[in-house]
Structures are given as structure tokens and as C-alpha cells.
Amino acid sequence: MTTSAMPSAALELVNVSKSFGGVQALKAISLEVHPGEVVALVGDNGAGKSTAIKIIAGVLRPSSGSIIIHGDSVEMLSPEHAKSVGLEVVYQDLALANRQPVYMNMFLGREQTNRFGLLAKNSMREETRAILDSLDVQVPSVDVSIESLSGGQRQGVAIGRATHWSRGIVLMDEPTAALGFQETSKVEQVIDRMKSAGKAILIVSHNLEQVFRIADRVYVLRQGTVIGERKIADSSAREIVAMITGADK
Ligand SMILES: Nc1ncnc2c1ncn2[C@@H]1O[C@H](COP(=O)(O)OP(=O)(O)O)[C@@H](O)[C@H]1O
Ligand SMILES: [Mg+2]
């Protein structure tokens, strides 16, 4: 494998399969993502990309195979369990509380309280500012509501939250699909900063130009099978398209 010289994987899937009744959505897929690496998962509609992300995130249980996190085989029992082992996911549809301020979203379900049991608002505000600053995500203030932000800013907050709470691994399923050109470019910069900070990032994207801008490696899924893996530096969009469609055969 081309990655054997790299440090040990943050995330590994080994022969993961998933059936929905008669449909085999994933057929023994294996992949790995290393710290400081952006790995793209591409494939046609229905190839199994979202199913793979959901299995890693504990939303779906695999029919067979293993998930290995920082060297330990982990059974993902639920999304809460996945979070508890440090896995965070950013989805296309932004999973934020629109009426709540930015800083409360950063701590949604994990609110800090002071010794009187009251919300520790100032410390959450400060921490939120530091998290967003570190990724260069710009918002007018951490007190404004999510609904007052642009799509790109919202996704910046979602990525900031994922980066903050994850332990080294961030999954993204089409994080820029709902965004315009400039907002997409901003989110790509944030992904770059996460990578520089040493996160292992697995991103599903149907935008091959984006994959070539931000990813280090790519796995191509076709009808539930990983039919190839390439280093971005050694491949081309033409080659990847041929792999996605099966024109390489
Ligand atoms: N909950 C489900 N129940 C039944 N079939 C499903 C379910 N989720 C996905 N599938 C099927 O699994 C296959 C892969 O779907 P998906 O992972 O969403 O593909 P992708 O994200 O690559 O477009 C498709 O054939 C899809 O219809
Ligand atoms: Mg999908």
C-alpha cells in the first residue's frame, strides 16, 4: 500500500459491509485516514458514500467488518457513542440550532455550568472565540444567532465545533454542497487549517475540482466496492471520472 510509510492511521475501516434487506450498499470496503491528511471518498449517486460515513459515525451498524480508531477496534453503538470516542461529523444540512447564539451552538448538549449550576456563558463565549479564531472563521460576534449568519459562516461554526470536540478525526459528508462559490472557498480554507492542525479528515464530495484542491488521497467507490485509491498528486480528474463511471474497464 502506498501509505505504509506514513504514521499509523487515525481511522481505519477493514472489510466493512452493509446490507439493507436485499441491497448490499457496501461490500467489504477498507480504507484509512492518517493524522494531517485529507482523504476524499468519491463515487456516483448510490455508490455507498453516505452509508460509509453513517457507519463510522454510529448512525448505522455495519453488517460485518471493523472500525479502528487510533489503533483500537471500536464498535460504534450510536451517534452518542461515536461522539464519546471523539468522532465528529459535519453534514451538508447544517445541524445547528438556528435561534441560539454562536457560542451556545459550540457547546450544544455539552454546556458548561459554573459552581452554582448556571450556564458559564462568559467562559463559553471566550472559548468559542478562540476556536473560531484558530480556524480563521469570521463571525460578527459569538453572541449573534446562527440564523443571522451566511451559509459559509454557519458551516464554519459547524466545522469549528467538530474540530473542537473531535479527537483527531473529522468526517464530512458534502460539507459545501449547499454553499456558493466564495463560501465554499472559505470552508476549504478552514479544512486546510484543520489539516495543518493534524486532524485526520474524511470528506465525501461530488465536486472533483474540490477534491483536487483539498485532498491528499482519494478512494473511489463504485456500487459499494472500493475500486481504487489514488494519491491526488499522482492522478487526474479524468482518471478519477473513469474510475467512478467504470470507463476504466
Ligand atoms: N436506509 C436505507 N435503506 C435501504 N437502502 C438504503 C438505505 N440507505 C442507503 N440505501 C441504499 O444504499 C445504497 C448506497 O446509498 P448511499 O450510501 O446513500 O449512496 P451515496 O451517498 O454514495 O449516494 C443505495 O442503493 C441506497 O439506495
Ligand atoms: Mg450521499
Image (spheres, rainbow, N blue to C red):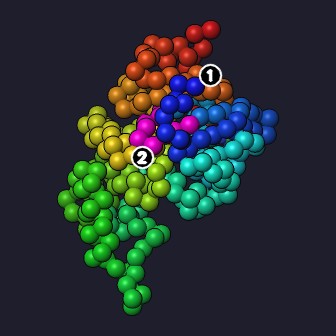
What is the total number of numbered labels drawn onto the structure image? 2
Residue closest to the eye, 148 or 204? 204
**Is there any visible trace of residue 135 in the rendered image?**
yes
> How far separated are the C-alphas under marks 2 and 1?
26 Å
Q: Is residue 26 visible?
A: no
Task: State the residue at coordinates (64%, 46%).
Answer: 67
Left/right placement of residue 131 relative to residue 238 reads left
Looking at the image, residue 147 lies above or below residue 26: below
Dot 1: what SS?
strand
> Where's residue 95, x and y in %?
45, 55
Q: Amino acid at mark 1?
A: Ile
Q: Are marks 2 and 1 in contact (CB under 8 Å)?
A: no
- Nearer the observer: mark 2 or 1; the answer is 2
Quadrant (top left, top right, bottom left, bottom right) of the N terminus: top right
Q: Secondary structure at mark 2?
A: loop
Identify the magenta region: 32-40
